Image (tube, helix red, strand yellow):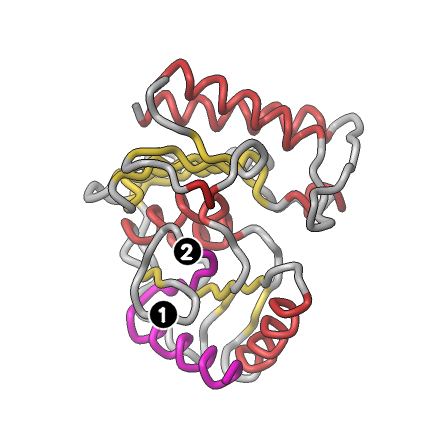
Amino acid sequence: MLERLCALAIDAGLAIRAIAATSFDQPAKSDGSPVTKADLAADRIIVEGLAKIAPQVPVVSEESADFSKAPGDLFFLVDPLDGTTNFVMGVPYFATSIALARDGAVVVGVVFNPVTGDLYTARKGAGALLNGAPVEVDASASLAAALLGSSYGADEGHMADGIRVLKALSSSVRKVAVRFSPALDLCNIARGRMHGYVDNGTTPEDHAAAALILAEAGGTVQDYGATDWDIRRPGVIAASNKVLADTLQQIVRDATS
């Protein structure tokens, strides 16, 4: 199945790239965030493709389903265009993400970057790959030397919380980048380019596949504000090692208490 999911992610990513080369509409979602022709085209490719691969398995997509409806024990989690705002602004930092979850845990994950052509994949218990080659986190990273990513939810409460956390992180680490693509940020931790990520607003569709990729590369993934991990919850704190993850959790607690 992994090979067919990879093909779907690539097809959707190439559709996004083709639309980016011409023009796109920018209607808004209910929360005011943009949804483009690229989102909808990629979503259609993936959802229709998954229906052919596994017609009995429900699909939760950011564009076509509601995660709160609580699907069964086996389901797909899809973000056809993670980083839509970047896409709209012409910032080349966005990805297509497909995950398969079983009994609340992601067991297969695929993330494709249509700008660079990088394809990240993972099977639970089998390690993480980038373009077919194994990747590992930089497990030796310390807080002072860490390069982090961070994002936050669009509503007023999440924004205020996220900005407090961002300020606290910025005074403790080497640098924090805010790029609003959790899938790519988590994958960049997996390949050793970054060391941590904090986001109070990312949804399961955004980060499910990349969370597995990071975990299989040796990283740590936890829910925002909690020390465990449940794929059904929003928010994520991730790091390249357990010590750094625990420190990030403490910084978040201190900044938001």
Residue 48 visible in the shown view: yes
Q: Tell me: 45 left or right of 75.
A: right
Q: Pinpoint residue 6: horizontal percent, then vertical percent.
A: 41, 27
Q: Any magenta on residue 250?
A: yes
Q: Tell me: 163 left or right of 173.
A: right
Identify residue type, mark 1. Answer: Ala
The residue that disc 2 covers is 233
Q: Is residue 70 above or below residue 170?
A: above
Q: Earlier in the sequence, mark 2 or mark 1?
A: 1
Identify residue type, mark 2. Answer: Arg
**Circle 1 residues within 10 Å: few <14, some 14–19, many ≥20:** few
The residue that disc 1 covers is 226
Give the overall secondary structure of the magenta segment.
helix
Q: Is residue 19 above or below residue 140?
A: above
The residue at 50%/26% (across/down) is 10
The residue at 71%/26% (across/down) is 19
